Image: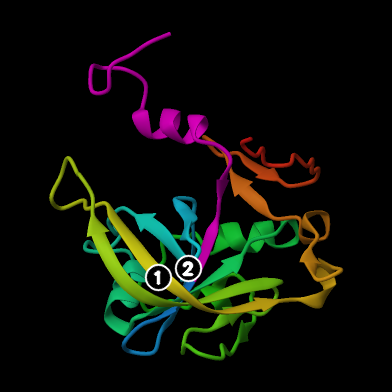
């Protein structure tokens, strides 16, 4: 099978999401300039640098109200965001927080989640999540788009604080089978990390 994008072929959105798998979920919490908490999952998310540690998440436009998605706008205007790790136990509430609610709606309350104070930023954390990354916004990059009213925006942030629940640690290291993170596949499918294998990185010479 081969098809050229834009030539009356299958939906490139669904196909791309089904090919680039699994994708980690950045469950992003922010606080608006008006003090409204926001929480939403982003499957275009990843770590992008070690020193200093940096992460990114990417979003399309806010089709509900126009303009930028809440998390993008909040990060840009307040300079902060938090990444909460989504787990198997929290999968339904994570999915509930993806609802296209109006800006004034608190998705923590909508999804039945508890807010926890952060140490270095003002954004609340998902108390039920076992791991959080407190981030300071560094920059945004506007990507190619087929419609200027539908931007593709990548948000970058520096990780300035890390919270890890002791319950998912074994000998000081994260035990992925205790953590049970979930990731995004294509279509409406997700994946749970429920098995792990190890391979040593090769050396040269």
- The first of marks 2 and 1 along the sequence is 2
Q: Is residue 165 left or right of residue 131?
A: right
Per the model, the C-alpha gap separating discs 2 and 1 is 12 Å
Relative to the observer, which residue lies in front, 44 or 54?
54
Q: Is residue 142 above or below residue 76?
A: above
Q: Is residue 17 left or right of residue 180?
A: left
Instruction: Give me the disc on residue 157.
Output: 1
Other-residue count near label 1 (Cα within 10 Å), few / some / many at <14 / 14–19 / ≥20? many
Q: Which residue is mark 2?
A: 51
Other-residue count near label 2 (Cα within 10 Å), few / some / many at <14 / 14–19 / ≥20? few
63 in magenta: no
In the orientation shown, which residue stands out farthest toward the top?
Answer: 1
Residue at the spot 60% in from the left edge and 39% down from the top edge: 189
Quadrant showing the N terminus: top left
Report x, y in % for residue 167: 84, 72
Report x, y in % for residue 200: 73, 42
In the orientation shown, which residue stands out farthest toward the right?
Answer: 171
The residue mark sitting in front, 2 or 1, is 2
Q: Are marks 2 and 1 in contact (CB under 8 Å)?
A: no
Residue at the spot 21% in from the left edge and 51% down from the top edge: 150
Bounds of the magenta segment: 1-28
């Amino acid at each position: 099978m081969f098809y050229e994008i834009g030539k009356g072929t299958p939906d490139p959105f669904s196909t791309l999401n089904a090919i680039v798998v699994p994708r980690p979920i950045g469950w992003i919490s922010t606080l608006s300039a008006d003090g409204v908490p926001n929480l939403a999952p982003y499957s275009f998310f990843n770590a992008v640098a070690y020193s200093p540690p940096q992460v990114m998440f990417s979003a399309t436009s806010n089709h509900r109200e126009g303009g930028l998605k809440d998390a993008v706008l909040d990060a840009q205007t307040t300079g902060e965001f938090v990444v909460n790790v989504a787990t198997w136990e929290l999968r339904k509430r994570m999915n509930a927080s993806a609802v296209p609610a109006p800006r004034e709606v608190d998705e923590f309350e909508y999804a039945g989640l508890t807010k926890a104070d952060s140490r270095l930023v003002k954004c609340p954390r998902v108390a039920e999540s076992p791991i959080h990354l407190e981030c300071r916004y560094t920059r945004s990059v506007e990507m190619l788009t087929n419609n200027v009213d539908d931007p593709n925006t990548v948000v970058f942030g520096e990780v300035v604080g890390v919270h890890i629940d002791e319950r998912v640690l074994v000998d000081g290291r994260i035990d992925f089978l205790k953590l049970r993170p979930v990731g995004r596949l294509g279509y409406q499918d997700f994946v749970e990390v429920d098995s792990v294998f190890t391979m040593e990185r090769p050396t040269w010479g």
